[in-house]
Amino acid sequence: MQTDIDPRSLIGRKAFDRNGTKIGTVDEVYLDDATGVPEWAALRTGLFSRDAFVPLEPSRLEDDTLRIPFEKSLIRDAPDFGVGRHLSPEQELQLYHHYGLHLPG
């Protein structure tokens, strides 16, 4: 995803899975501690007002929506750490493993 985008501009945008199915709306954006680059987004799924964390890389911003290259079921099963808190390194590791992503660096 673009790294020069203002993270606040993502808040409230609709998010869709790899098949074009709506997942929810971006509730919060989490920045990388070292670089300040947007790294994770918490999506309000509407399912019991739960938030699902998704990686912003390899997601794309397209036509004012966030396109996430994973299945809706995988996204909905992502660990929910609650919004408004800092993600710990252990929580980020859980998310990387959940999505089968390689750790940066």
Image: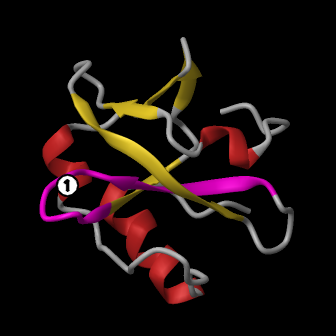
Q: Position of residue 13 (x, y in %)?
A: 50, 34
Up/down of 28 relative to 59, above or below: below
Q: Which residues are magenta?
A: 37-51
Secondary structure of the residue carrying numbered label 1: helix
In percent of width and height, residue 97 lies at: 37, 67
For residue 38, side relative to residue 16 (left or right): right
Q: Residue at x 39, y 34 (%)?
A: 15
Q: Residue at x 45, y 64 (%)?
A: 96
Looking at the rendered image, the quarter that the N terminus falls into is top right
Residue at image location 83% in from the left, 62% down from the top: 36
The C terminus - image quarter: bottom right
9 displayed left or right of 17: right
1 vs 25: above or below: above
Q: Residue 50: give x, y in percent of width and height.
A: 24, 65
Q: For residue 62, which quarter of the picture?
A: top right
Residue beneath label 1, please? Answer: 76
Above or below, comparing residue 105 to residue 34 in the picture? above
Name the foreground residue: 48 vs 99.
48
The residue lying toward the viewer, choosing from 46 and 21, is 46
Residue toward you, 56 or 98: 56
The image shows residue 74, relative to residue 79, as above or below, that is: above
Q: Quadrant of residue 84?
A: bottom right
Coloration of the structure image: secondary structure
Residue drawn at point x = 58 percent, y = 42 percent: 57
Tag 1: residue type?
Arg
Other-residue count near label 1 (Cα within 10 Å), few / some / many at <14 / 14–19 / ≥20: some
